[in-house]
Image (cartoon, rainbow, N blue to C red):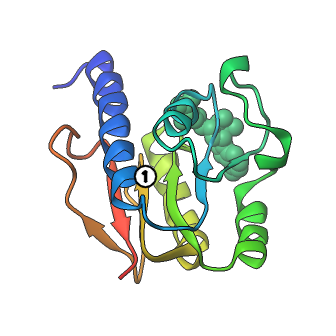
């Protein structure tokens, strides 16, 4: 059985591997990149580093990130994602090239319920050919699951695409 330390390390390693893979696979797409859940800003910091020239918008209900990983105000969509994502669909249309979601907490059951509720809200926003990287299994009708890159740990990260 995996210890909590194993679970944590596997999640971090998988997030990095999946973000690196998704950034490279979508590098020629012009649509925005969405980070759902800023938290401490670790994954945002990595995304900025690997995608320095791309427009990264951050969705977060309360910004409390490390000062080095705090996005500019005009790149933050502040509020509950169940309100800010539909607003982003109106603003950007179905154009997101890469969506990364890390919105969960420690309770797996709650995370799963949250992912079920969030899936139909995310689904219309991803551009054709775009990728969605999630820390939790999502429940999409039209987006399909993509094989993980070699360094990612199965079950710790998920990637979906819009065909
Ligand atoms: N990926 C981040 C990092 O590397 O530091 C960690 C993200 S943390 C696990 C989850 C974040 O999602 C929290 O900051 C929380 O405030 C945010 N969040 C959770 N539910 C949300 C919701 N419904 N709307 C907006 N933000 C939410």
Q: How many marks?
A: 1
Judge: label 1 CB < 8 Å from ligand 1: no
Closest to the observer: 33 or 157?
Answer: 33
In the displayed structure image, the side of residue 10 where residue 47 appears, left or right: right
Q: Residues within 10 Å of mark 1 (few under 14, many from 20)?
A: many
Residue plotted at (64% across, 53% down): 55
Report the residue at 30% width, 39% height from top. Answer: 17
151 w.r.t. 138: above or below: above
Q: Is residue 105 visible in this depiction of the protein?
A: no
- Residue drawn at point x = 31 percent, y = 16 percent: 5
Q: Quadrant of the N terminus?
A: top left
Secondary element under disc 1, as helix, strand or loop, is strand
Please indicate whether residue 138 sits to the left or right of residue 49 in the image: left
The location of residue 156, given as percent across then percent down, is: 30, 41
* Residue occupied by mark 1: 134
Ligand 1 shows up in the quarter that is: top right
Residue 101 is situated, as x and y percent measured from the top left of the image, at: 52, 50
Q: Residue 136: horizontal and vertical position, in percent?
A: 41, 50
Q: Quadrant of the C terminus?
A: bottom left
- Tell me residue 18's x, y (percent): 33, 46
Q: Residue at x 54, y 27 (%)?
A: 42
């Amino acid at each position: 059985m995996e210890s909590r330390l194993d679970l944590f390390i596997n999640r971090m390693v998988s997030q990095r591997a999946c973000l690196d893979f998704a950034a490279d696979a979508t590098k020629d797409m012009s649509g925005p990149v969405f980070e759902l859940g800023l938290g401490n800003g670790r994954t945002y910091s990595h995304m900025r580093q690997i995608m320095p020239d791309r427009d990264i918008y951050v969705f977060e209900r309360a910004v409390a990130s490390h000062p080095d990983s705090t996005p500019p105000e005009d790149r933050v969509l502040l509020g509950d994602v169940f309100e800010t994502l539909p607003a982003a669909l109106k603003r950007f249309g179905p154009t997101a090239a890469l969506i990364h979601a890390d919105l969960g907490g420690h309770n797996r059951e709650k995370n799963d319920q949250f992912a079920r509720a969030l899936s139909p809200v995310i689904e219309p926003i991803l551009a054709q050919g775009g990728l969605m990287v999630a820390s939790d299994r999502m429940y999409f009708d039209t987006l399909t699951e993509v094989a993980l890159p070699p360094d990612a740990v199965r079950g710790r990260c998920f990637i979906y695409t819009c065909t």
